[in-house]
Amino acid sequence: MASAKAGTLHGREHSAGDLDERAIGWIRQRLAGTGVGVIGDKDWLDRKLAECITDQGLGVADAWEMFSEVVAPQNIGVDSDRFLAFIPLSPSVASVWMDAVCSAANFGSESWFEGAGAIAAENQVIELLIRTAGMPAGAAGCFMSGGSIGNLSALAVAREQADGRRVVVVADTAHASVDNALHLLGLEALDVPTGPDCRLTAAAIRETVGDRRDVAAVVAAGGSTNAGVVDELNGCADVAAELGAWFHVDGAYGLTAMLLPELRSRFDGIERADSFIVDPHKWMFAPAGSCALVYKQPALARAVHTQHGPYVDILRTGDDLYNPCDLGYQLTRRSSGLPIWFALALHGLDAHREAIRRGLDMAKRMATALEDCAVTELVMQPELGVVLFRRNGWGAGEWSAWAADLLRAGIAFVAPTTYRGEPIGRLVFLHPNTPTTIIDELIASLVRSTR
């Protein structure tokens, strides 16, 4: 590889050459569609990348070749319409381009003082969620970098309202980020068993809590990650009120579905939450790295998260109420809410609703096909876009082999899971462009032996 003479990093005299044209071409190609990808080989990647960072630099042609021919192909396509594992990403074209614009602009989105325009636009999305949830007047929120830090930020506020209580009620199906947040905050999880439907209920909480009076918070799911189940939000809110506890809803994946009028009633009780989160990079079709965090009483969050010191006190202006950095544990952040704001402004809510409905419809179609298949059975009917199912005679080994075969064939990327300790299959339909033909492909792969 020929090394390049050191050049200018910034401004009109930069030495990046035609990088802009290369990058725009690559993005356009990516947005046209991508395959499921591969799981990269570490030894091969280490060898290929070993000599990339040098004193003189590789120059644009060789550096771009290393990215486009080595780095980029050695990844799973989490934005692929055949990515059916974990919780998929399917950023819209408009949101991707606005994300690129945000990267170029580097808006100072931690404070109104620096980034009023960006924050004002982001707040329109926050207000949409507040309005849809039916939160009371005065509710407010901000964007964080993801659901994990959103949960952490909300639970930190919950801890400060608890008068020394340190126990937090969580379902045995709660996302791992909730448990991690409790550990970091010095709080103790009280696991409440869920029934066959994986739903957290008021009755189960009351039975588990008993006469305890040390409960600081109750955490429910507005669409659990593993099963896609909406907890009994009204019942959970009732118990939280009885205990004088904070009520937080982790709606990172599924709460977006409340935007559909026909599904809003499934989330009854969300209006009673003290805090909730939604990840637009999931079912709102934004690029990775966004979480909308909402508080019923944002003043409580400001009392916990506002940072002080010579370096940041200049941020305290007459518009302090709009500082995202005062509502969560994050100071510097990118404008992660702008891509979804722009896509909503461009396409409107109805287009996004139809894209959400596409995932719901695909999950129902897959469930029907599994019910009709002689060798499979549903664990439960899908409530949102997650489908859990069994295959007769299969254990963990067979499920792993099935997933590997699908990836190798380029049919889909899937990740089996467990249900009550039992290895099962799991598919998540979210990308609106996932072809209906994939259902027949998956059924065929389940019927034939994988090993």
Image: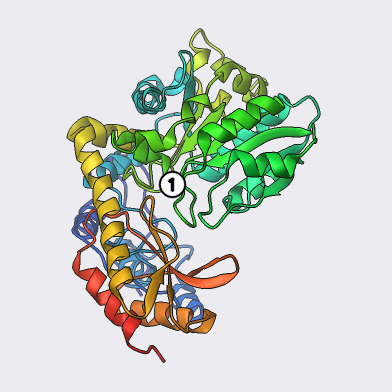
In the rendered image, the vertical position of residue 209 relative to residue 386, given as above or below: above
Where residue 4 appears, as percent x and y from the top left, is: 35, 63
Who's the residue at 28% across and 55% down the image?
Answer: 431
| Mark 1 residue type | Tyr
Q: Give me the residue at 64% from left, 44% from top.
A: 204
**In the depicted structure, whether residue 133 falls above or below residue 256:** above
Residue 358 in the image: above or below residue 132: below
Is residue 38 visible to the viewer in this orientation of the structure?
A: yes
Closer to the camera, 155 or 226?
226
Task: Give residue 237's position: percent from left, percent from top.
Answer: 58, 30
Residue at point 61% right, 38% down?
Answer: 202
Q: Which residue is mark 1?
A: 253
Q: Is residue 219 left or right of residue 324?
A: right
Left or right: 326, with 339 as reference point: right
- The image quarter in which residue 430 lies: bottom left
Residue 368 screen position, x and y as percent: 28, 64
Picture quadrant where residue 434 is located: bottom left
Name the quarter where the C terminus is drawn.
Answer: bottom left
Q: Nearer the viewer, residue 138 or 110?
A: 138
> Which quarter of the rendering shows the N terminus?
bottom left
Secondary structure of residue under mark 1: loop
Seen from the viewer's position, the closer of residues 143 and 233 is 233
Q: Give the number of callouts.
A: 1
User: Where 63 sits versus 361, above or below?
Assistant: below
Q: Position of residue 3 (x, y in %)?
A: 37, 68
* Label 1 crowd (10 A; few <14 / some 14-19 / many >=20): many
Kindly give the residue lying farthest to the top in the view shown. Answer: 318
Look at the image and name its color scheme.
rainbow
Image side of residue 451 versus residue 441, left or right: right
State the residue lying farthest toward the bottom: 451
Whether residue 65 is visible, yes or no, is no
